[in-house]
Image: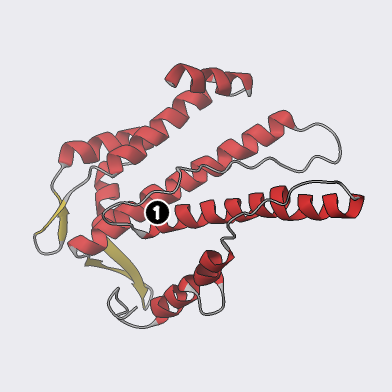
Amino acid sequence: MYDKVMMAMQVMDFTNEEIREVWKLLSGILQLGNLEFMTAGGAQITTKLVLNDAADLLGLDSFQLSEVLTQRSMILRGEEISSPLTVEQATDSRDSLAMALYAQCFTWLLSKINLRIRGTENFKSVGILDIFGFENFQVNRFEQFNINYANEKLQEYFNKHIFSLEQLEYNREGIQWEAIDWMDNAECLDLIEKKLGILALINEESRFPKGTDCTF
């Protein structure tokens, strides 16, 4: 797999330095996920070696990275004031940083690919959708929910164009054919995305102070 990715990036005119930096960034993101915290007057990082490796891969100062992940900074009357985070808040901070870095890397990769394959004047862009498949774990978290939702949207698109619209076209052209019964997932999508669907309710709950899974 590594060789295939390297070859694909070279075909897309990525320089050796760019490829090396992408691998370093992804390795740094993975190392961030290995950071662990404990409570000692606020959250403190217990895996110092992991912190040093992550900081080195990301090109950051390990002390500053530690401060960013375990402290909250505010400007009050022109002065910067820091307060310690809880272990739960530090964990969220770590995960948010990893996701933001990955998103920026993904966006940069797409922009590089689009520049490489740009052809006619009508060309706009090419997007990549990374689909893991519909999965049902013992605990399904919000990220998995979004992945499954994306799959349902793709299934709706497929149903509409392959079944619904094609069959309408056959009827207009008077083609003799046998109608195909197919399962419509519109009700599933309505449950998620309608005005009072799951996404709308999650958004509303997240605006309430001290909103939790239970109150949702």
- Relative height, residue 60 to residue 42 (above, below): above
- From the viewer's perspective, is 179 left or right of 92? right
Quarter of the image where one finds residue 129: top right
At a point 41% along the width and 35% down the height, the residue shown is 25
- Relative height, residue 83 to residue 128 (above, below): below
Give coordinates of residue 86: x percent, y percent.
Answer: 19, 65
At a point 44% along the width and 49% down the height, the residue shown is 134
Q: Quadrant of the N terminus?
A: top left
Q: Quadrant of the C terminus?
A: bottom left
Viewer-proximal residue, 193 or 51? Answer: 193
Question: Going by the picture, which residue comes out furthest to the left?
Answer: 40
Residue 177 appears in the rendering: yes
At a point 58% along the width and 24% down the height, the residue shown is 14
Residue 68 appears in the rendering: no
Give coordinates of residue 139: x percent, y percent.
Answer: 27, 56
Give coordinates of residue 209: x percent, y percent.
Answer: 33, 83
Q: Which residue is mark 1?
A: 144
Kind of residue indicated by mark 1: Gln
Question: Going by the picture, which residue comes out furthest to the right?
Answer: 173
- From the viewer's perspective, is 206 left or right of 105? left
Q: Secondary structure at mark 1?
A: helix
Quarter of the image where one finds residue 123: top right
Viewer-proximal residue, 200 or 197? Answer: 197
